[in-house]
Image (spheres, coloured by chain):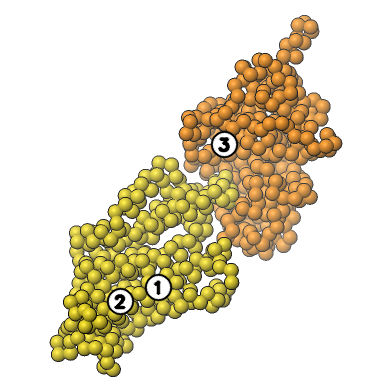
């Protein structure tokens, strides 16, 4: 209840939350409400490149497919990639960051240097290279993005663990013979959960954008599966006349990223009272 | 006390930290003995290595620490020979309890105090308490009654922030003795509390220790507290034990200039508040010879070149000081 009230006061975070909930809703009920369910896969040459109208609110693309339909169907894809990447990156980055931060020493140094190596390579280029090596498709895109994204998590968790480790209760637990695994996962992890949550939320927006770039470059899901990034790529040859081709998928990406960022910022303020803005 | 068989004997223990400029000796030839059921005060200024010593006894040394020599015998066993897993399983909590300095930070803020205390008992409760959760709970309730926590039943379900500092420290005492350890290490257990609470906590600790025949090492820089609660005192300076004596020598019998100055720091004795000029040298810049030399009012030429040896003045009094052993040496021929 307390958290909801804080949300209600933070208008930006509330907007973010609404956008994200709306996107999740579209993912679930999208396939049942889209006006032209068949347009997901079938071309309709007769009605190609039609501007927005009452029949096609967002217009049609160069295969005559309804853009509204394809934008809605692309939502699930974008969210799925984002959640998949975040989950995979957390699965690797969080335990590694925790252990490296807690034990420190050579092991911690080694882990940090490995993350340095990953971070030194621009993530998009690494993702493109990996996606080319792996089979095209959503699994490959998720794997590629996870590989480039886990070091961010790892470093974040590492530094949080370093500071949580100095808490007296950790020393008290050590002195009372609690095992290190237990201290790390049962006591430190819950204490650093909130920064992790914030990091994930903001990260989801970043992943959606990177995934769209991969789609734009033709490395994401294979056509004709609806994809925001791929839709923008296809629109290039028809610009500037057919402006609706690029505008609506672009708007969808923009809103999704904005939503996660606003939500992440709001969560940070709510979870960490020290950063809470006075108003 | 049988001097030949103490519960804990720290002998010539030396510990160094690795720093950028090489090894820095933090503890250098520490000697300490605690008998079963005895309360030992460990006194010294900040930075003397008291806390480091207490943690070393528990085997909790920071990364980069290296034992240079000596022994830490506990119940006839050299703790320095045991590896981390054994220490964690058999020694900590079960045989040596620990009370940290700041009660407000000593519990994980996210969990109920009851679950945290039960967690410790689940790993370390001795067989006579029993293995079952209900037995552990019963023991905890009984202890909380003993440390005068009101309504123990509901208190177990409360979160750390719902208690006052004094209450939290009582809970820490309960947690430290829950598994019936032979020795409790209390690292400045009352520094974070106000003076009246301080007295209550220490009185409680003393009462429980005497009742259960548990030995206690009370780390403090308050000699007033030591005079009130401790059977014996060890004084540390710059990583060395400079003087050890029993309670009855406290007021008139101390010999080391540092101990005397410490006693003079107490406002009740000196009338006005006095300090000791200078500060404890940093671990990287230890003076040769006697480490207290540069601040000592009774300094001799030999102090700056040679380290004084521990000298037994009486069965219950040893001191490391050239000025003291010099006066003995001067006295011996006269007696002979």
Residue B284 x, y percent position in the rendering: 55, 30
Residue at position x 37%, y 69% in the image: A205
Residue B322 can be seen in this image:
yes
Judged from this view, the residue extending furthest toward the front is: A240
Q: Secondary structure at mark 1?
A: helix
Colour yellow belongs to chain: A
Q: Position of residue B155 (x, y in %)?
A: 67, 61
- Quick one: label 2, few (<14), some, or many (20+) residues within 10 Å? some
Colour in which chain B is drawn: orange
Q: Is residue B310 above or below residue A73?
A: above
Q: Residues within 10 Å of mark 3 (few under 14, many from 20)?
A: many
Residue at image mark 1: A258
What chain does badge 1 belong to? A
Classify residue A61 as left or right of residue A96: left
Q: Residues within 10 Å of mark 1 (few under 14, many from 20)?
A: some
Left or right placement of residue A172 versus residue B314 in this view? left
Whether residue B6 is visible to the viewer of this picture, yes or no, is no
* Quadrant where the C terminus of chain A is found in the figure: bottom right
Q: Which residue is mark 2?
A: A250
B249 lies above or below A239: above
Return the disc, 2 or 1, that comes first in the chain's sequence.
Answer: 2
Judging depth in this view, the residue of B182 and B301 nearest the camera is: B301
């Amino acid at each position: 209840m307390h958290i909801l009230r804080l949300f209600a006061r933070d208008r930006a975070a509330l907007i973010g939350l609404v956008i994200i909930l709306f996107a999740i809703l579209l993912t679930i009920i999208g396939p049942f409400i889209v006006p032209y369910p068949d347009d997901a896969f079938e071309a309709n040459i007769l009605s190609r490149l039609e501007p927005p109208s009452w029949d096609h609110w967002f217009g049609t693309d160069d295969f005559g497919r309804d853009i509204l339909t394809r934008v809605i169907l692309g939502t699930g894809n974008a969210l799925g990639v984002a959640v998949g990447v975040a989950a995979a990156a957390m699965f690797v980055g969080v335990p590694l960051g925790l252990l490296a931060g807690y034990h420190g020493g050579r092991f911690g140094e080694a882990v940090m240097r490995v993350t340095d190596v990953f971070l030194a390579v621009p993530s998009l280029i690494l993702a493109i290279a990996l996606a080319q090596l792996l089979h095209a498709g959503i699994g490959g895109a998720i794997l590629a993005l996870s590989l480039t994204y886990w070091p961010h998590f790892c470093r974040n968790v590492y530094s949080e663990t370093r500071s949580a480790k100095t808490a007296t209760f950790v020393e008290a637990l050590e002195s009372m013979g609690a095992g290190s695994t237990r201290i790390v996962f049962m006591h430190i992890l819950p204490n650093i959960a909130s920064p992790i949550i914030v990091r994930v939320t903001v990260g989801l927006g970043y992943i959606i954008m990177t995934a769209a770039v991969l789609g734009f470059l033709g490395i994401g899901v294979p056509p004709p599966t609806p994809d925001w990034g791929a839709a923008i790529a296809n629109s290039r040859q028809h610009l500037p006349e057919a402006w609706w081709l690029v505008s609506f998928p672009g708007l969808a990406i923009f809103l999704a990223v904005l939503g996660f960022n606003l939500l992440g910022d709001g969560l940070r303020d709510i979870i960490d009272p020290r950063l809470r803005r006075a108003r | 006390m049988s001097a030949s068989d103490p519960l804990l004997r720290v002998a010539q223990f030396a510990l160094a930290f690795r720093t950028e400029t090489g090894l820095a000796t933090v503890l250098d030839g520490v000697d300490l003995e605690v008998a079963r059921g005895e309360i030992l005060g460990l006194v010294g200024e900040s930075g003397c290595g008291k806390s480091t010593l207490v943690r070393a006894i528990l085997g909790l040394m920071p990364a980069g620490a290296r034992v240079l020599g000596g022994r830490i015998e506990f119940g006839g066993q050299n703790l320095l020979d045991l590896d981390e897993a054994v220490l964690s399983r058999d020694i900590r909590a079960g045989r040596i309890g620990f009370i940290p300095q700041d009660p407000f930070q000593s519990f994980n803020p996210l969990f109920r105090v009851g679950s945290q205390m039960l967690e410790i008992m689940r790993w370390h409760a001795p067989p006579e308490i029993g293995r079952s959760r209900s037995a552990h709970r019963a023991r905890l309730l009984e202890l909380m009654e003993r440390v005068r926590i009101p309504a123990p039943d509901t208190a177990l379900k409360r979160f750390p922030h719902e208690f006052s500092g004094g209450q939290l420290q009582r809970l820490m005492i309960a947690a430290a003795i829950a598994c019936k350890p032979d020795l409790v290490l209390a690292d400045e257990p009352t520094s974070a509390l106000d003076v009246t609470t301080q007295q209550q906590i220490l009185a409680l600790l003393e009462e429980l220790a005497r009742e259960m025949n548990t030995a206690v090492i009370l780390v403090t820089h308050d000699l007033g507290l030591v005079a009130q609660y401790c059977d014996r005192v060890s004084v540390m300076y710059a990583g060395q034990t400079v003087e050890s004596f029993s309670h009855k020598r406290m007021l008139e019998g101390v010999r080391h200039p540092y101990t005397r100055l410490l006693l003079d720091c107490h406002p009740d004795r000196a009338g006005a508040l006095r300090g000791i000029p200078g500060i404890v040298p940093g671990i990287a810049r230890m003076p040769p010879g006697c480490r207290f030399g540069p601040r000592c009012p009774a300094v001799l030429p030999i102090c700056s070149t040679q380290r004084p040896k521990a000298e037994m003045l009486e069965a219950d009094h040893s001191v490391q000081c050239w000025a003291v052993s010099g006066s003995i040496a001067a006295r011996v021929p006269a007696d002979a």
